[in-house]
Image (spheres, rainbow, N blue to C red):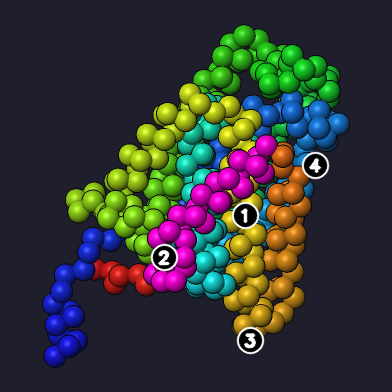
Amino acid sequence: METASAAAVPSAPRLRRTLTLWDLILYGIIVIQPTAPMPAYGVFSNAGQGHVVTSILIAMIAMVFTAMSYGRMARVYPSAGSAYTYVGRELHPSLGYVTGWSMTMDYILNPLICTIWSVLTYIGFDGISTLSEEVDNPRRNIFLATVLVCVITGFLAAAEVYGAQLLSPQTIFPESEVENAFSHVAAIAGGALMTKAISLTLLIATIGSGMGSQLGAARLLYGMGRSGAIPKKFFGAIHPRTRIPANNVVFVGAIALVGAFLISYDDGANLLNFGALIAFMGVNLASLTHYYVRGNDRTMGQLIPPVLGFVICFLLWISLSSKAKIFGAIWMVVGIAYGAWKTRGFQSELVNFDVPPEE
């Protein structure tokens, strides 16, 4: 009788599983941006003493390890909560909450930064995992899409900057030309018309990346809202007709609009990396714990990728600017204080990771 009664109760609206592997790959490339290295070409060239291609490929290899951890954890927990769910379920709910709070800053800042201007970043691949509940066969497709996007965008970026280096006699750009170095190279190739075409392409790519980031942010906030980490009535709601977290889409869009007038590109990018790298480290630890520490398949293939991914992300995190660390720490303190208030000093359950049944 209990089973029959439970079956008779209609389930709440859920996200619809319609996305394929190629949908995920296209989404990931759009969020990272095919044009990603163009705005920062001069900065990379100066910092790497002209070794831009090498720097991009090294970064790609480094991020592949973390991409593998994301894909592996999506096989276990195909949830819209992404790193928030992986860390919370595998390590501890409180650590999952902290990870989710850091990612919230990351996902809200990403569309905001795109409103200001585009960001070379491999971190866009983690947005793929936020779509887990809308994917057909997520346990296979999330892993493949995450790794493939990281590799595809890496080689695409390397090809772009290699072409620029073939055209440009410069490897070190003066301060006045750093931000527009790629446009100067485009002028060498095709004059003013090519420069304008590059600028238009960057604008279109930025719009696409901002929209994709907003989509991922809405899904992360939905995952956190559904589990009660943030107000459930608003953030955990699904629109009954469109089957998307509509409140979150509007919320992130409003923040991007207002924040674009208040924050600089550099500050936003540094803060974004602060939150993203914390999430990356958490996912690598979750993957290590699930597959190597607790799992039966204790092979080097289960040990080396998450360890290397964690170490690389940690080194990148400690190299962030002091300003980013200070503001990032303030954001984390606010989140922890909210969690303490919500649970009356962490005396009650902080989050509930139980996912309602699909229709």
The residue labelled by disc 1 is: 278
Res 3 visible: yes
Amino acid type, residue under disc 3 in the picture:
Asn
Within-10-Å neighbours for mark 3: few <14, some 14–19, many 20+:
few
- Separation of residues labelled 1 and 3 (CA atoms): 27 Å
- Closer to the N terminus: mark 2 or mark 3? 3
- Closer to the N terminus: mark 4 or mark 3? 4
Of all residues, the one furthest to the front in this rendering is 344
The residue labelled by disc 2 is: 343
Amino acid type, residue under disc 4 in the picture:
Thr
The residue labelled by disc 3 is: 296
- Separation of residues labelled 4 and 1 (CA atoms): 25 Å
Residue 152 covered by magenta stretch: no
The residue labelled by disc 4 is: 54
For mark 3, give the secondary structure: loop
- Which quadrant of the figure contains the C terminus? bottom left
- Separation of residues labelled 2 and 4 (CA atoms): 48 Å
- The answer to which of 46 and 116 lies nearer the viewer is 116
Single out the mark in the foreground, 1 or 3: 1
Residue appearing at x 62%, y 32% in the figure: 267
Chain part drawn in magenta: 323-352
- The answer to which of 358 and 108 lies nearer the viewer is 108
